[in-house]
Image (tube, rainbow, N blue to C red):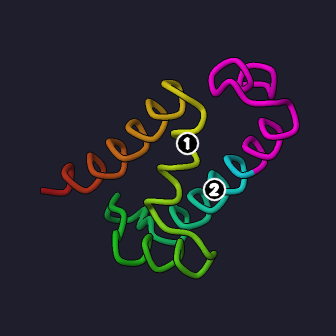
Amino acid sequence: MSAKDLVKINNSNLKTAQNDLIEIRKEAENVRAALESAYNARLNTVNIETFNQKLKESGSSISQVYQSFKSAGASGEAAFRSLSSQVFNTNLQLR
């Protein structure tokens, strides 16, 4: 997604869209780092408590991640739902 795409979605100006994309990228990196820390490859599970703690340590939260992704419109919300689904499905496979 480009800043121009985000301008169209949110009816914002280019500078605001660029800042939004920077924020989305930052949140995505926080999620990636938190997932890496919380994932147990041996058990193929994600420790949700560790995930939330790592997000908190990065200055973020799951609600902030959602709000950042949501600012990208339907595709951002779909990406957040997909991420959530994958995390929870990983844990369900253990059962």
Residue neighbourhood size for the residue with mark 2, other residues' Cα within 10 Å, grouped as few (<14), some (14–19), many (≥20): many
* Dot 2 amino acid type: Glu
Residue at 63% x, 62% y: name it. Answer: 30
Is the magenta region chiefly helix, strand or loop?
helix
Bounds of the magenta span? 1-22
Mark 1 touches mark 2? (CB < 8 Å): yes
Q: Nearer the viewer, residue 35 or 61?
A: 61
Q: Quadrant of residue 11?
A: top right
Residue, disc 2: 27
Q: Which residue is mark 1?
A: 69
Residue 6 drawn above or below residue 36 = above
Residue 39 higher or lower than 94, as above or below? below
Amino acid at pointer 1: Phe
In magenta stretch: residue 13: yes
Horizontal side of residue 69 vs 21, given as left or right: left
**Sequence-first disc among 1 and 2:** 2
* Residue 47 is one of the magenta-drawn residues: no
SS class, disc 1: helix
Q: Position of residue 56 (x, y in %)?
A: 52, 78
Q: Is residue 31 left or right of residue 29?
A: left
CA neighbours of label 1 inside 10 A, class few (<14), some (14 to 19), many (20+): many
Quadrant assignment, res 32? bottom right
SS at mark 2 in the image:
helix
Residue at 12%, 56% in the rendered image? 95
